[in-house]
Image (tube, rainbow, N blue to C red):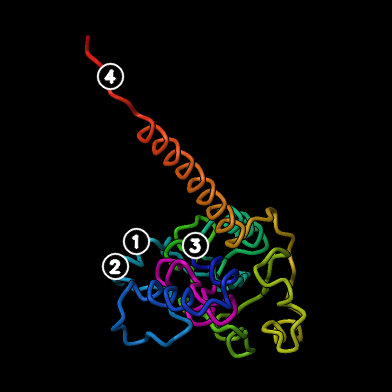
Amino acid sequence: MLLCVRDRQSSENQHHASLQRQFSHGNNNKSENRNSPSSTRISHFLPTSRRIVQFSNGKGPGPQARIIYMDGAFDLFHAGHVEILHRARELGDFLLVGIHTDQTVSSNRGPHHPIMNLHERSLSVLACRYVDEVIIGAPWTITKDMITTFNISLVVHGTVAENSDLLNEEDDPYKAAKELGIFKLIESPMDITTTTIIKRIVANHEAYKKRNEKKTESEKKYYEGKTYVSGD
């Protein structure tokens, strides 16, 4: 998280950028993908079909179910995600959530994103009571074929997002849904995002550093001015 902010603040510092790349690969200079800007860290998480099923409610959509689709990164799964998923679930009978790949998130948000890898993010979303099923590694662009395949009735997106210009892009990922008249922009109940969480943590980290620096300075002055105390 600290690297996400430092990368923006020190983009002109090549030495610092080099250190960031090393940390991104777990301090391993021999990483096979050491030159890849999309890499964030080495994950040892090993998903299995049984582990994934444990997070699922095991229910599928009925033949006449109104299926709602929402996609995103859902990094650092937080209260804002829960509330918007709740809003989306209320619009239909079955909520299908698409989780973007690590590469997709990194290319759109920058190096050191996402904080959590694809499987961690997928299980976090799947554990939410309002979510019925997830697409692990969902495509960035929603196509008509995808809408037909999953029998999607409505595609939704919140008003609060990391990329506020997403819906205004020439290459609109929701173009197909809009053409079919099944796209809906829903009001986000909370304005919290992954970025706001990271900034809050960084701010607390800086306050912690300043507090410790002040404490260290006080201890230094104490020991420098320390004198012998007689036991008499």
Q: Provide the secondary structure element on which disc 2 rests.
A: helix
Cβ–Cβ under 8 Å for marks 1 and 2: yes
Mark 2 to mark 4: distance in Å?
A: 67 Å
Above/below status of 7 relative to 89? below
Residue 64 seen by the camera? no
Residue position marked by numbered label 2 in the rendering: 50
Residue position marked by numbered label 4 in the rendering: 229
Label 3 neighbour load within 10 Å: few <14, some 14-19, many 20+: few
Q: Quadrant of residue 157?
A: bottom right
Mark 1 to mark 2: distance in Å?
A: 6 Å
Query: In the image, what residue type sits under mark 4?
Result: Val
Q: Of label 2 and label 4, which has the lower sequence position?
A: 2
Q: Nearer the viewer, mark 4 or mark 3?
A: 4
Q: Quadrant of residue 87?
A: bottom right
Q: Is 106 in front, or is 81?
A: 106
Cβ–Cβ under 8 Å for marks 2 and 4: no
Cβ–Cβ under 8 Å for marks 4 and 3: no
Residue 2's tag is 3
Q: Of label 3 and label 2, which has the lower sequence position?
A: 3
Cβ–Cβ under 8 Å for marks 1 and 3: no
Query: In the image, what residue type sits under mark 1?
Result: Gln
Mark 1 to mark 4: distance in Å?
A: 65 Å
Query: In the image, what residue type sits under mark 2?
Result: Arg
Q: Quadrant of residue 73?
A: bottom right
Residue 120's tag is none
Label 1 neighbour load within 10 Å: few <14, some 14-19, many 20+: few
